[in-house]
């Protein structure tokens, strides 16, 4: 199935590329077919802004939503850099950081929001990468989730 048709079916749209938060490249190609994305937050124009620690100011469900938005931002950055998301062969690895309250231990459940979105768009074969979900005490701008992805192109 066409990635863009699947996104439309899910009510998702490609966004503008995310603004840079420093001196770096949001998407970096290496090897012949590998792509690495920089850590990306879930702030999207037109959506409610959510900041704070998951398990503190934010609920698990709000953290999952922000993880989904991180993926949408990453897909938008990829679209603007590789030209066609249908070129993605498979997602290799997700590394996610969750801004967590000291007594919050459900980081994998937060990142399930991101994993489920990737799987729902790309299918289980291409869309279920290896993954790490790490709790941290702070993220830039007090964002709740930051995600980076490694993927392979066709």
Image: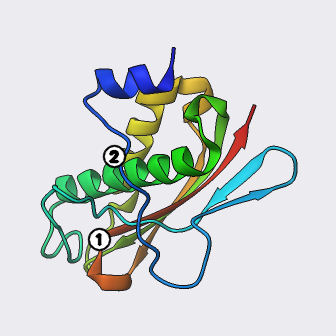
140 left or right of 79 in image: left
Q: CA distance from mark 2 to mark 1?
A: 13 Å
Q: Residue furthest top?
A: 1
Residue holding disc 1:
144
Let me know if residue 2 appears in the view.
yes
Q: Which type of secondary structure does the marked residue at label 1 adopt?
A: loop
> Residue drawn at (51%, 14%), measured in percent from left and top?
1
Q: Image height check: is 20 above or below 133?
A: below
> Residue drawn at (15%, 68%), measured in percent from left and top?
58
Q: Residue furthest right?
A: 32
> Residue drawn at (41%, 70%), measured in percent from left and top?
19
**Mark seen at residue 76:** none
Residue holding disc 2:
113
Mark 1: give few (<14), some (14-19) or many (20+) Cα within 10 Å. Answer: many
Q: Choose top left, top right, bottom left or bottom right for residue 127.
A: top right
Residue toward you, 32 or 101: 32
Mark 2: give few (<14), some (14-19) or many (20+) Cα within 10 Å. Answer: many
Quadrant of the rendering where the C terminus is positioned: top right
33 left or right of 134 in image: right
């Amino acid at each position: 199935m066409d990635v863009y048709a699947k996104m439309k079916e899910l009510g998702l749209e490609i966004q503008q590329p995310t603004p840079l938060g420093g001196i770096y490249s949001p998407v970096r190609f290496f090897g012949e077919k590998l792509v690495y994305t920089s850590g990306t937050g879930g702030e999207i124009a037109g959506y409610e802004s959510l900041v704070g620690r998951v398990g503190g100011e934010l609920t698990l469900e709000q953290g999952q939503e922000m993880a989904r938005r991180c993926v949408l931002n990453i897909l938008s950055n990829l679209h603007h850099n590789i030209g066609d998301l249908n070129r993605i062969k498979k997602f290799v690895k997700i590394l996610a950081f969750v801004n967590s309250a000291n007594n919050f231990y459900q980081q994998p459940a937060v990142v399930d929001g991101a994993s489920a979105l990737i799987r729902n768009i790309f299918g289980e074969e291409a869309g279920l990468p290896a993954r790490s979900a790490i709790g941290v005490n702070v993220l830039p701008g007090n964002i709740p989730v930051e995600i980076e992805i490694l993927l392979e192109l066709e």
